[in-house]
Image (spheres, rainbow, N blue to C red):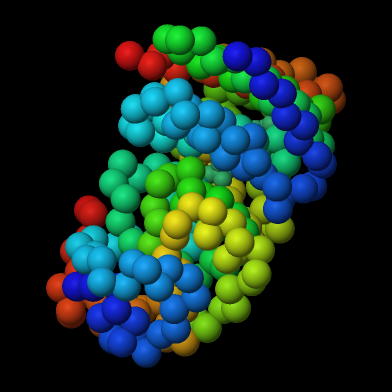
Amino acid sequence: MHQEYTIIEGDFVNAGKASSSVKKTLKQLNVSPQIIKRVVVALYEAEVNAIAHAYGGKVLVDIDSDKINMVVADKGPGIPDIALAMQEGYSTARPEVRDMGFGAGMGLPNMQKNVDKLNVTSEVGVGTTVEMMVNFA
Amino acid sequence: MTIREIITLLDGQLCLGEQRLDEEVEKAFASDLMSDVLTLHETPMLITGLCNVQTIRTCDMATLDIIVVVRGKVVTDDMIELAEENDMVIISTKYSMFKTCGLLWDAGLKPIF
Ligand SMILES: Nc1ncnc2c1ncn2[C@@H]1O[C@H](COP(=O)(O)OP(=O)(O)OP(=O)(O)O)[C@@H](O)[C@H]1O
Ligand SMILES: [Mg+2]
């Protein structure tokens, strides 16, 4: 099953729409609650990042019988040093992002903890792509 | 303690979740930081001063469904709407975060760590 969502620049109110929708789909497919939580927490963190640090983008979701693949690709400033960004506590979040309750530098490490495979690629001045995979069993 | 007892203790107001008033609550977690909430492995009641749609969305993702909003922040209609879809309870209290936590701790609510 293939799903696509658009993330709109600055649209904080709708951050999490894709994750909510994926949550519903996985529930209908009887995926276990623990796995669903890992999937949607990771996807939500990536969605929020695409709004908080970039100018929006796309979410592509592919659900198979045994796994889910998620790609969050944004247009944005990119990440100059991915290893640094992956460190817990590293954040360049703007004050308005912090006012929303984000910007603790915990998103990328949290994605890493929740998914079975994480791949972050980025080109400065172009954008960032986060690929994640979670096995259902 | 029950949700009903929590509301009385906090001199609070129930914004959503009347059908769940007699449900027992055992554990709570307090944070204004949604990044923190997203790292929890358990599903305690959330005590927070952050009052916006993102609070509800974050709780939805983290599967927390009882929220106490402190410092008398106004719970908006779009928050209620989103929370309703997920069968959540929202309580609002005028008390500060510190007072809210103190009262609930005294009454026997447990931390998750
Ligand atoms: N999509 C992105 N585009 C550009 N920079 C990004 C992107 N995602 C992350 N970053 C950079 O990596 C840093 C760390 O990201 P991470 O998600 O771990 O923390 P955060 O978003 O700052 O805070 P939190 O996720 O705890 O709310 C960000 O502050 C930002 O500098
Ligand atoms: Mg983040």
Q: Position of residue B58 (x, y in %)?
A: 51, 50
Q: Quadrant of residue B96?
A: bottom left
- The residue drawn where x is 33% and y is 61% is B45
Which sits in the foreground, A64 or B62? A64
Q: Residue furthest bottom?
A: B11
Q: Is residue B76 above or below residue A32?
A: below
Q: Quadrant of residue B52?
A: bottom right
Q: Is residue A137 above or below residue A85?
A: above
Q: State whether residue A120 appears in this view.
A: no
Q: Is residue A12 left or right of residue B81?
A: right
- The residue drawn where x is 33% and y is 32% is A34
Which sits in the foreground, B90 or A118? B90
Q: Position of residue B72 (x, y in %)?
A: 52, 83
Q: Residue furthest left?
A: B108
Q: Is residue B16 above or below residue B88?
A: below
- The residue drawn where x is 50% and y is 81% is B71
Which sits in the foreground, A43 or A101? A43
- The residue drawn where x is 39% and y is 24% is A31
Q: State whether residue A2 appears in this view.
A: yes
Q: Is residue B46 left or right of residue A117?
A: left
